[in-house]
Image (spheres, rainbow, N blue to C red):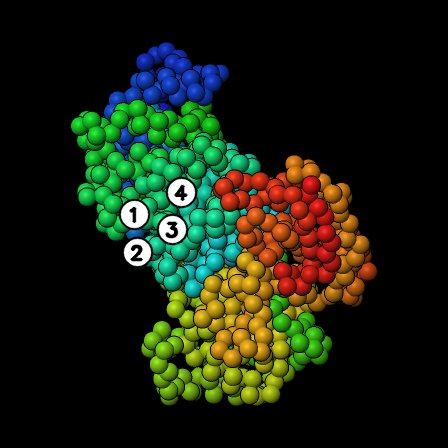
Amino acid sequence: MRTIIMAAACCLIAQLANAQYKSIYHDGWIDFNKNGIKDIFEDPAQPVDRRIADLLGQMTLEEKTCQTATLYGYGRVLKDSLPTPGWKNEIWKDGIANIDEDLNSVAGNTAAQTSLSYPFSRHAEAINTVQHWFVEQTRLGIPVDFTNEGIHGLNHDRATSLPAPIAIGSTWDPALVREAGEIVGREAKALGYTNVYAPILDLARDPRWGRTLECYGEDPFLVAELGKQMTLGIQDQSVASTLKHYAVYSVPKGGRDGSVRTDPHVAPRELYQLYLYAFRRVIQEAHPMGVMSSYNDWDGVPITGSYYFLTELLREKFGFDGYVVSDSDAVEYLFTKHHVAATYKDAVRQVMEAGLNVRTNFTPPKTFIEPLRELVRDGDLSIHTLDKRVADVLRVKFRLGLFDQPYVKDPKKADEVLAPGRTQDFMLKMARESLILLKNDSNLLPLDKQKVRRILITGPLAKETAYAISRYGPSHLSVTSVEEGLRNYLGNTVTLDYAKGCEMVDSAWPESELIPTPLTAAEQTGIEEAVGKARNADVIIAVLGEDEKRVGEGMSRTGLDLPGRQQQFLQALYATGRPVILVLINGQPLTINWANRYIPAILEAWFPNSLGGQAIAETLFGDNNPGGKLSITFPKTTGQIEWNFPYKPGSQPTGNKRENRTSVFGPLYPFGHGLSFTTFSYTNLTITPETQHPQGDITVSVDVTNTGNRKGDEVVQLYINDEVSSVTVYEQQLRGFLRITLAPGEKRTVQFTLRPDDLSLLDKDNVWRVEPGKFQAMIGSSSADIRVKKEFEIR
């Protein structure tokens, strides 16, 4: 009954508003300022810059400053699900830049749950009602930009589920990522959202960092290629893509996260070649309309207070022409943590002068708007600076068409766009492609249903599902666990036993990683129960790793071993003598050295989407041949960190007899690693031309053949090496990749184009250029499995 009443109220408010302000809606234009004439900013035929200038000229200080702040949506800052008469007394009576996560029933926040998030058409109608209020009840009627998160899929009740970004990166499939972006953008548009905070372009260089699972990987080229496609996909649907987190956000000192994050130890040349590379390329090639500035510093200067980062680099060098929002507390930290501002008010001044457009945080927008007004009135901030910042926000709103069609045109269509099952095939494809076969001794996998009669599935993650529901993705999902996926797949053909075996962690964790404690009686009983069932099984499937409470934002780790009693449990299963298959559910590389030595088969699933359990079952029995590749290096121990790709010559030695006296060398699994149930050969590497001038393109091709007896995917990876250079460059640099599917015996010629940007370096004078000299092109199945290579020369 409550749902029906809310829906009726929503429709009634919209009808009353439309009736009262019907006179402002004309054929082909809207009289936003309600003066009875078509102003330049109201005329769709006028150039955007003229429309911006006209609107700015009509705005008061109050109206301008309201376009510099976010109003967090229902259940966060906004306490009303729909407009009320009291809104006329709030600061947003003069407008607002954007409203974030409004009425989305965000996961894990009981205060934000609402009957207006679903059915989907109800949400679209509710967003229209809110937009009607801003268009019709404010003096100038400036529409709102409705923002939302989208890195795991759109952050909305029952939207399409994507796996964690580290799993998306493991697909190495730009076309699939483009489709994911289109789905996120299409669902956002249908629901009334106009701006999606995705993709994340951070590099996961320190695997202890809790947000490793939210990155595509550790390599700048891979992240740039996938981030570009996600951005293009979202914006193809007339929705803005906002990149995050700009910049140098992902390498806090010691991998430590949360409010302590500061002091990234990144050298200047590394800053440009690694951490800014993806931002530069995605901005220049995909033209995103948004960027989120991070709350860390670099070289002692907070990013959000840096004119160099927000204006000189971002706008003048990279060409960004959208608007910049701040990450949570980024403005406040100038005062409270970085201590570069004596007062919060001065922090507001610094970020506005640096180039920030919109302050976004989980506190009322007046906390930013009011001191900003004081700064301008007192002459401490130029009105011209404010006008520039507001103009950027208005430009995005004009580009989005909000001044031409501010409302969801057909709210009922949202139910069709997000209809249950509509993206099922895509979700399953992404779940399959993200799986990585790390190890498969004696071809234990795939299993044969005709030969395996009894299986034990065990482990704390066998029946778990919460990892598929992210704070930054859809909520209220129906998730298929690994156990359920296997049970559905096997039916009555195989007996499937289950025992949990152990909990995710012990009561003393994480301290127990430092000081081991004996098993409790309950823990011993749990392990013994599972081991008893294991002795009667033909094969054991152990689902171990991390859950959403062990890795994520604010949850960096100091160790990377299997948490709690999982290692002891795995060893007890192995001691039965039955073959053990390890399925990993986790958000960051784990130091599974013992498992790599003794467990015959290991399948990496990361945090899969809601259909991950089905994809895992299909893979274990061979209906899906895994083709995913690692987008991040697995170190053997945290003592090696940083150990990642790319790396400088000699910085990551394989080790020799003398070196091995004190240290462990080599990765557990290298960047780009991933096995298959079939095999591939590489032949006929061709480079055209073999000698080229610095501004010319080079074509590199290779023949790849499926030499096994199963259809399978291979990710063909192109690396280059600049043999002699004026500055030290990386040992290998990824400069091309393609995921292909080949039938047994099938051969395909794979072709890459190396452009000048792919060969350029930042020279001694900090100038990007292609230096003459010899290069090596290397193609293979991983960064450590190069099959063919050949020289070419730049003259």
Marking on residue 106: 3
User: Above or below — where is 38 with respect to 152?
Assistant: above
Mark 4–mark 3 Cα distance, whole angstroms, equals 20 Å
Asked whether disc 3 touches disc 2, contact meaning CB atoms under 8 Å apart, the reply is: no
Q: Quadrant of residue 536?
A: bottom right
Q: Decide if residue 748 is in sight here.
A: yes
Secondary structure of the residue carrying tag 2 is helix
Secondary structure of the residue carrying tag 4 is strand
Residue at the (56%, 45%) spot, across then down: 761
Q: How crowded is mark 3: few (under 14 residues within 10 Å), some or many (20 or more)?
A: many
Mark 3–mark 2 Cα distance, whole angstroms, equals 22 Å
Mark 4–mark 1 Cα distance, whole angstroms, equals 12 Å
Marking on residue 329: 1
Asked whether disc 4 touches disc 3, contact meaning CB atoms under 8 Å apart, the reply is: no
Work out whether mark 1 precedes mark 2 in sequence or the reverse, and give the earlier one.
2
Q: In which quarter of the image is residue 709?
A: bottom right
User: Above or below — where is 60 with respect to 748?
Assistant: above
Work out whether mark 4 precedes mark 3 in sequence or the reverse, and give the earlier one.
3
Marking on residue 159: none
Residue at the (26%, 22%) spot, across then down: 60
- Please, which residue is most extreme toward the top here? 37
Please count the marks in the image: 4
> Pointer 4: what residue?
292
User: Above or below — where is 160 with respect to 501?
Assistant: above
Work out whether residue 494 or residue 346 is closer to the camera in this orientation and state it.
Answer: 346
Marking on residue 259: 2
Asked whether disc 1 touches disc 2, contact meaning CB atoms under 8 Å apart, the reply is: yes
Mark 3–mark 1 Cα distance, whole angstroms, equals 20 Å
Image coordinates of residue 695 in percent, x first then y, are 65, 36
Secondary structure of the residue carrying tag 3 is loop
